[in-house]
Amino acid sequence: MRAGGGRAALWVTLALGLACRSRTAEPAPDAGAARAPVTQETLPACEVLLPADVREAMLPGFTMKQERTCPTCGPLCIFRSASEKDVTVSVTWDCRPHYAQADPHALLAPSLQTGGEEIPALGRAAARRSPAQGMLQVMTWDDDTPCALVVTWLGGEPEQALDVARAALTATRPDVLQLGAPAAPTPPPDAGTP
């Protein structure tokens, strides 16, 4: 059994719990949407959301593995370093249509009520909290997409979670998110005039 197994389980539980706790009720879907909405099921894999150049700039020397996704979030990208064995970093996405129109203060409220503090100038809204010693979680909502990102840093220098959140937020673009969406059905060919 690995020595860090308990810490990793705690870390994953806290990351997923933070993503799940921040939700408000889903509004009725808009029937007039031109593009397929971004959902947890349509999010692309970690390799697409965080391309190699972004990963290397964000966490040099770390390897990435995509873990199972939770029922209510997108892929869970886990980063580990061979040289810093006590450090584990995760990034996950939580995309909900109502995030695009939600009041930033309403988005932040659950994190702030559990001891978090607001981070200025990071997406639409962002908060950080330390649920355990040596752990930092950063949750931020994107300006350009209906997604929240949760970055969890365990061990080492957890303040680096802010830099990871900035890099992941920059890499989260509408065109990248649509890569996982099913293609729109093509209309049948025109049969001509009757």
Image: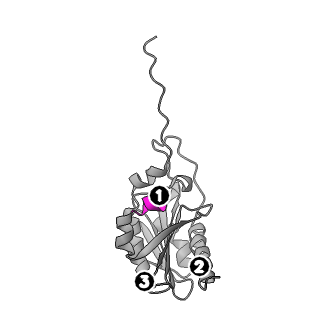
Over which residues does the magenta segment extend? 45-51
Residue 106: image location, x then y, percent = 52, 67
- Does the magenta segment cover residue 71? no
Residue at left offset 46%, top offset 44%? 35
Residue 156: image location, x then y, percent = 46, 87
* 121 to the left or right of 31: left
The amino acid type of the residue labelled 1 equals Pro
Q: Which mark's residue is nearer the viewer, 3 or 1?
A: 3
- Residue 152 visible in the shown view: no
Element assignment for label 1: loop
Quarter of image, res 170: bottom left
Quarter of image, res 131: bottom right
Q: Is residue 31 above or below residue 18?
A: above
> How is the model colour-coded?
one colour
- The residue indicated by pointer 3 is 159
Disc 2 and disc 1 in contact, CB within 8 angstroms: no
Q: CA distance from mark 3 to mark 1?
A: 26 Å
Nearer to me, 58 or 130: 58
- Residue 184 visible in the shown view: yes
Element assignment for label 3: helix
* 7 to the left or right of 159: right
Residue 66: image location, x then y, percent = 52, 65
Q: Is residue 117 above or below residue 23?
A: below
Sequence-first disc among 3 and 1: 1
- The residue indicated by pointer 1 is 146
The amino acid type of the residue labelled 2 equals Ala
Residue at left offset 53%, top offset 54%? 39
Label 1: few (<14), some (14–19) or many (≥20) C-alpha neighbours in 10 Å: many
- The residue indicated by pointer 2 is 8
Sequence-first disc among 2 and 1: 2
